Image (spheres, helix red, strand yellow):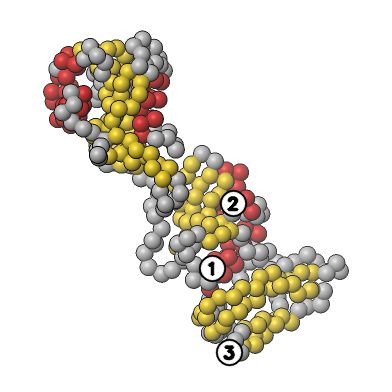
Amino acid sequence: MCFKNHETMAVAMISISLTQDYCSFKWGLPNGFLRKQILTETSTTAKLKFSCPPTLEASFKKTAIYVLSPNKSSPSVMMPELLDGWNDEYGGVIINPESLPMSANAFASAVQASLFNWKMKGKKGVWLKILKEQADLVPIAIQEGFNFHHAQPGYVMLTYWIPSGPCMLPDSPSHHIGIGAFVINDKREVLVVKEKCPCSCSGVWKLPTGYINKSEDIFSGAIREVKEETGIETTFLKMVAFRHAHKVAFEQSDLLFVCMLKPLSSEIIIDEKEIQSAKWMALDEFIEQPYYEDDHLSNKIIDICIAAHEDNYSGFTGHQLNSKLDGRLSYLYCNHVN
């Protein structure tokens, strides 16, 4: 058996006794060491191949893994610990980030021993979350073969694909989710804003838009964005359309859901950090802006919004339903069904 260690370790002589039903490891220990069994597992018959001489191949049902535990009169030395974690439902392993060794040498040894163990068990994908305060461990994990998957405030996620062949783990999050709000009152006036930005729509009166927050429903995000930008209270009526674009911010794809909202108030109070101005604008004046005459996509969206307002287009309403897949309530957006 071969381990790559970053610390000085005592070498135990190993003799292996094989029978048809089991494989037992017998350790010839140097003076001063005690044998301690830390893991016994029953598994299906598997091929055991060691990556360095001597090469052994055996079929077995039970394995016993031992660490060397020194007695009080000997130096403190032991075999590498395995990383703590749990199995996922796809044949992989999720490592517990709270249990990672803080020592670089101990972490490297634990990663090597654990990967060897998981390969023997036929595991597939390994998920390793390294917290911000553990950032020194990231280069070590990369050196041991892990790859970056995604990052969020407070952690970075890395992955390791054990089987040969293409990695089957899902890609990192690839889409931004945005909303556009069409708010029209009884006077056929549309709530419009001017953004504080140097983009192509600068100076154009446009619909309030923004990104939804993490764990926020689409309709809730639309109501919140309108309130934050203009101070107008609204309620959700229907989703009228959505646009799918690619290679937008940070080369990610972008989904923009256009929602029709009913105003519950009329006094505008803008967010001066984000919005240059906001007002109620006559619908005809809004659609006659030169910007929209040349923008076929925006023009089509506004046409659909007007049709929905005039009850010539049904759109999608939200229905909260429970899913047996995950046991959670979620919103299904669909046409009304009698």
Q: Secondary structure at mark 1?
A: helix
Tag 3 and tag 2, C-beta contact below 8 Å: no
Label 1, label 3: how far apart the Cα atoms are: 23 Å
Q: Position of residue 204 (x, y in %)?
A: 24, 18
Tag 1 and tag 3, C-beta contact below 8 Å: no
* Amino acid type of the residue that numbered disc 3 sits on in the rendered structure: Gln
Image quarter where the C terminus lies is top left
* Amino acid type of the residue that numbered disc 1 sits on in the rendered structure: Trp
What residue do we see at 65% from left, 59% from top?
A: 106
Q: Position of residue 166 (x, y in %)?
A: 36, 64
- Residue hosting label 2: 97
Image quarter where the N terminus lies is bottom right
What residue do we see at 70% from left, 75% from top?
A: 11
Label 2, label 1: how far apart the Cα atoms are: 17 Å
- Residue hosting label 1: 118
Badge 2 density bin: few <14, some 14–19, many ≥20, Cα 10 Å: some
What residue do we see at 61% from left, 84% from top?
A: 22
Instruction: Inspect this view and state whether residue 238 appears.
Output: yes
Eye-nearest disc, 3 or 2: 3
Q: Position of residue 265 (x, y in %)?
A: 36, 13
Label 3, label 2: how far apart the Cα atoms are: 39 Å
Q: Which of the labelled discs sits on residue 20, or is there none?
A: 3
